[in-house]
Amino acid sequence: MAWTVETRPWDDAEGLQLRAKQQSELHADVNCDDHPHGPRTSAADVDHFVVAVAADGRAVACGGLRALSARSAEIEWMYVEPDCRGGGAAMTVLRALEGVALYRGWVHLQLKVGTTQRDAQRFYERAGYRNAHLFAQYGGSATSVIYELDLRVETRRPGTWKSVHR
């Protein structure tokens, strides 16, 4: 299925709905701590936010970037509607965020998933991310798995894009 990825403001109505569903799923999983080590996200914290839209116009997935430094960013707020999972929307959002990161000079990406979120862990591993140490915001969290990707390294499978930033 084809998806269109659109940059949206943080307070976009469809983005708000998707993030609310994400938070509901996270809170339903008692082993997922959902950012306990910092303040709640506001528009000032979000450097880029996207929504994937299906051919019928329905917003079905979202994700965003938060700058960590001049060269690194955190991928956050990844969510796909349950009836669209496994259809490519998440990968489309992820690749779009990686492209934005490269454009902005963020060559090192990090993200957090809960230890019980095995589907998410497998997804990021298939996408080329590797397990990493806990970064500052989540230091000491026993319920988080941190993944990272260096966009300067050509770690993709044959036929996928290669980084132009060296």
Image (spheres, rainbow, N blue to C red):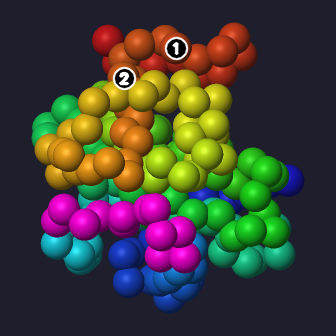
- Drawn side of residue 157 relative to residue 9, left or right: right
* Residue at figure coordinates x 58%, y 17% from the top left: 156
- Drawn side of residue 132 relative to residue 43, left or right: right
* Residue at figure coordinates x 23%, y 75% from the top left: 40
Of the pair 146 and 16, the residue shown nearer to us: 146
Q: Which mark is residue 150?
A: 2
Q: Which residues are magenta?
A: 27-38
* 149 to 122, vertically: above or below: above
Q: How many numbered discs?
A: 2
Asked if the residue at tag 2 contacts the one at tag 1, i.e. Cβ–Cβ closer than 8 Å, the answer is: yes
Question: Badge 1 is on which residue?
Answer: 155
Q: Position of residue 10 (x, y in %)?
A: 37, 76
Magenta region includes residue 31 = yes
- Drawn side of residue 4 relative to residue 166, left or right: right
* Residue at figure coordinates x 49%, y 12% from the top left: 154
Amino acid at pointer 2: Asp
